[in-house]
Image (cartoon, rainbow, N blue to C red):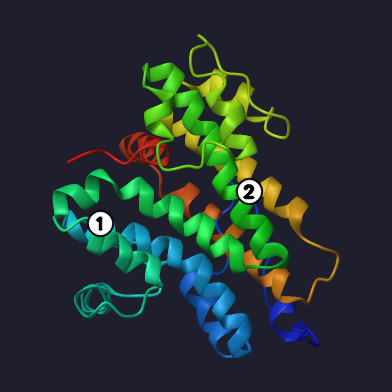
Amino acid sequence: MIKKNYYFVATALPPLQIGVPPEISFEEFETLLQDNLTANDDDKTEVIRRFYDIQNIRAFWKNESLDPRGGLNEIELETALLDQAGFPTYVFDFLNRYDSTKSRLEHFPELVSTYFTAEQKHATGFLQDYLRFEREWRLVFTAFRAKQLGRDLTKELQYEDPDEDLVAQILAQKDSKTFIPPNGFQELQPLFEEHSDDPLALYKALCEYRFSKVEEMLDIDLFSIDRLLGYMVQLIIVEKWFELDKQKGTEIVNQIVTPKRE
């Protein structure tokens, strides 16, 4: 398949930097994409936005405000849940498996885990690399937090495949007093150790870490869909960096590990 060249879109995008207010909003960026992307490439952006739609399902159940980076507004989200349409099958399999809001919130990490594994399986290029990275750093971070909070690491990773290499490496340290990250994630250790008592600083450090790692994943083709997907991810990271306050930082850090039980 011939890859579409998005020269016009790419040259219209201002540079992004952590700590510097973006000159384009996510809404403006999304409008630019809608006007220019092929249907196939637009589907790739929907995979990224689906993560926020899934997070918004949880927010909807808790009567909290929705993240605007999702593809569905509140009415569309409610309709999708009632009609069981507009999401991949794995979302509705989860809803049918847990029939009460309480149990759905309790097992919500299972749905997040399924999102990453299912979407990564069908993705290619940057999108596949990004989904793998997002899932894996979260697993490593979960282990760090579990050690700090005295949580059962086996329970924290109960929805993951224990035979998978990364998961097995993490679980091998379940009885140790400290956690040493697997190869490829050593950069997380000093971040966690330095900011473990300051959730806001920790989340900001994680934003910087993720922003940098996404940049490393991108190829040299400045006008490809992969570049635009990377820009989307980095724009979200920059916007969220500016949205944080101390309370929000604590909530987000806790949710990365295990969403609060209701």
- Residue 60 placement (x, y as % from top left): 21, 61
Crowd band around label 1 with a 10 angstrom C-alpha radius: few (<14), some (14–19), many (20+)? some
- Name the residue at 58% across, 66% down: 23
Answer with left or right where residue 119 lies relative to residue 58. Answer: right
Residue occupied by mark 1: 59
Element under label 1? helix
The alpha-carbon separation of the residues under discs 1 and 2 comes to 24 Å
Crowd band around label 2 with a 10 angstrom C-alpha radius: few (<14), some (14–19), many (20+)? some
- Tell me which amino acid carries mark 2: Phe
Which residue is the extreme one toward the right?
Answer: 220
Answer with left or right where residue 192 lies relative to residue 242. Answer: right
- Name the residue at 56% across, 69% down: 24
Residue occupied by mark 2: 133
In the depicted structure, whether residue 32 falls above or below residue 118: below
- Tell me which amino acid carries mark 1: Ala
- Name the residue at 45% across, 50% down: 113
Element under label 2? helix
Quarter of the figure with the C terminus: top left
In the depicted structure, whether residue 23 falls above or below residue 161: below
Q: Specify the label residue 149 is tagged with.
A: none
In the depicted structure, whether residue 172 falls above or below residue 110: above
- Residue 241 placement (x, y as % from top left): 49, 47
- Residue 19 placement (x, y as % from top left): 58, 46
